[in-house]
Image: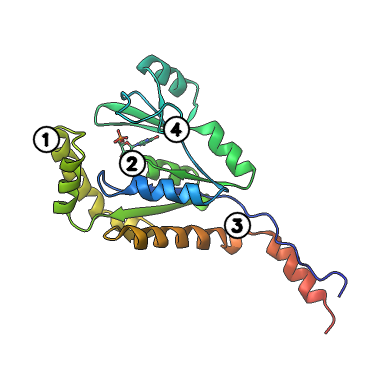
Amino acid sequence: MSNKPTAHGPTRGLLLMVVAPSGVGKTSLTRRLVADHNDLHLSISATTRAPRPGEHEGRDYHFVTRPAFDDMVAQDAFLEWAEVYGNCYGSPRAPIMEALARGESVLFDIDFQGAMKVHAQVPEDSVLIYVLPPSLAEMSRRLHARSQDSEEVIAQRLARAKDEVAAWETFDYVILNDDFDRAYSDLAHIYHAERQRRSRNPWIGGLVADLLKEEI
Ligand code: 5GP
């Protein structure tokens, strides 16, 4: 009885990559997941694109100049980086590694190619989730409604969405965002289940060894 284990041990963190075409509600889903979980941190990307109205330095992105971005690339400061619609975006390596070392998790709000690059580097600790729009017509409607992009960029985003959706089988999970609360619940359940994976909870080995020593 005396060595009956009661404590839950440390869980290994994971890299949660949520990919979706623009206008599918990904930002609302991911921001809420991070707000609801204090063991999950958002990776704040560096970008050379100008801030949009309402965006804040350090909260939405680290807004940097092209030379500053190139310096970070030269110093290998990014886990991955890419050029998207003429601007550069990169995921700073240090905060990601620090969170993992603390057993915490990191959520990436990055594009398809970035998610694939992170996954290739840390396959066992990354989880790929794709968020589907209910239809391309609805996605087009949302992109027009937010009036952030020119017609040309909207057309590019829709064409890219088609290519990505066609690659849906690359992802571990696919969520349909036709209803925000249900899509959020799916996302939160995926995160919770991934945290519970046996491979991320090596302390269970000790618990089982103790259980097997128990006299009954
Ligand atoms: P936006 O300019 O609309 O904020 O982002 C444009 C695209 O760049 C989105 O698909 C977004 O997910 C992606 N993105 C943002 N940060 C990163 C990053 O650090 N790396 C990569 N590869 N893509 C990113």
The residues bearing labels 2 and 1 have C-alpha atoms spaced at a distance of 20 Å
The tag on residue 151 is 1
**Residue 85, image x and y in percent?**
24, 31
Neighbour tally class for label 4: few under 14, some 14-19, many 20 plus, Cα within 10 Å: few
Q: Residue at x 40, y 28 (%)?
A: 56
- Name the residue tied to disc 2: 111
The residues bearing labels 4 and 3 have C-alpha atoms spaced at a distance of 29 Å
* Quarter of the rendering occupied by the N terminus: bottom right
Neighbour tally class for label 1: few under 14, some 14-19, many 20 plus, Cα within 10 Å: few
Amino acid on which disc 3 is placed: Arg
Comparing marks 2 and 1, which lies closer to the viewer?
Answer: 1
Amino acid on which disc 4 is placed: Arg
Pointer 3 with pointer 1, Cβ within 8 A: no
Q: Earlier in the sequence, mark 4 or mark 1?
A: 4
- Name the residue tied to disc 3: 200
Amino acid on which disc 2 is placed: Asp
Q: Earlier in the sequence, mark 2 or mark 4?
A: 4
* Quarter of the rendering occupied by the C terminus: bottom right
Q: Where is ligand 1, by quadrant?
A: top left
